[in-house]
């Protein structure tokens, strides 16, 4: 492993082929790091993140992560404000949002570009073109799930819940919502 790039408040360990953060780095940096970039690794275990009590900005781009990896967290990180999970393998929007809301309750910025759940049109992940809901539905869903979120992916969160953007049928052709007449 190469020597990490860091100053007092940031630790950058990009392309180190890490599956978890080594214990010695946790001991040295956990009490003061505010910005942690672990992009382009192979992280499988995130349980050590709870030790980083000053962490405000976390970048986990391109780690082939999916929902199960978030489940390895041991407790919430209420101080975290920025979470970058671009180019991973998150494929279940409701589950991903439940986990993010539980472990990162005060997020203000979230980016999920290039994940199967993000219909961003950026062609970062081949699965994106197969989703049945559009970006407006996706962003509305996330805005409802994360009440403190201000920025999503590439822009400000718009809390305009237009029903036209919600799917009227699920994949089996059954209604997702029931309507009643008054």
Image (spheres, rainbow, N blue to C red):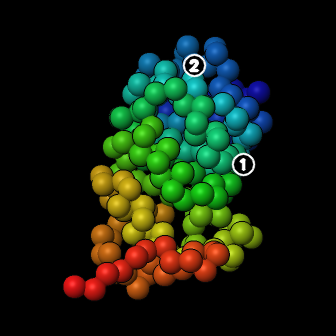
Residue drawn at 57 percent across, 24 percent down: 48
The image shows residue 122 at horizontal and vertical percentages of 62, 74
Q: State the image coordinates of residue 113 (x, y, percent, origin top left).
A: 58, 63
Question: Which quadrant: the N terminus?
Answer: top right
Of residues 153 and 32, the one nearer the viewer is 153
Contact, mark 2 vs mark 1 (Cβ under 8 Å): no
Earlier in the chain: of badge 2 and badge 1, it is 2
| Mark sitting on residue 64 | 1
Residue 75 shows in the view: yes
Answer whether residue 11 is visible to the viewer in this image.
no
Q: Is residue 22 above or below residue 38?
A: above
Residue 5 is left or right of residue 127, and the answer is left
Which numbered circle lies on residue 26?
A: 2
Residue drawn at x 34%, y 43% as measured from the top left:
106
Please identify, in this view, whether the residue under mark 2 or under mark 1 is nearer the observer: 1
Quadrant where the C terminus is found in the figure: bottom left
- Left or right side of 54 for 87: right
């Amino acid at each position: 492993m190469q020597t990490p790039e860091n100053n007092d408040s940031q630790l950058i360990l990009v392309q180190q082929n890490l599956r978890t953060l080594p214990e010695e780095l946790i001991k040295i940096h956990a009490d003061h790091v505010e910005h942690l970039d672990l992009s382009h690794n192979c992280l499988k275990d995130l349980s050590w993140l709870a030790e980083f009590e000053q962490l405000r900005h976390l970048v986990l781009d391109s780690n082939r992560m999916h929902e199960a990896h978030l489940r390895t967290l041991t407790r919430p990180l209420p101080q975290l404000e920025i979470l970058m999970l671009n180019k991973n393998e998150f494929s279940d929007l409701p589950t991903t949002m439940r986990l993010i809301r539980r472990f990162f309750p005060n997020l203000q910025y979230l980016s999920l570009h290039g994940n199967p759940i993000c219909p961003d049109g950026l062609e970062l992940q081949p699965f994106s073109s197969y989703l049945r809901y559009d970006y407006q539905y996706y962003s509305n869903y996330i805005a409802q799930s994360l009440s403190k979120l201000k920025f999503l992916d590439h822009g400000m969160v718009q809390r305009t819940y237009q029903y036209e953007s919600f799917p009227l049928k699920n994949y089996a052709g059954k209604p997702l919502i029931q309507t009643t007449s008054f």
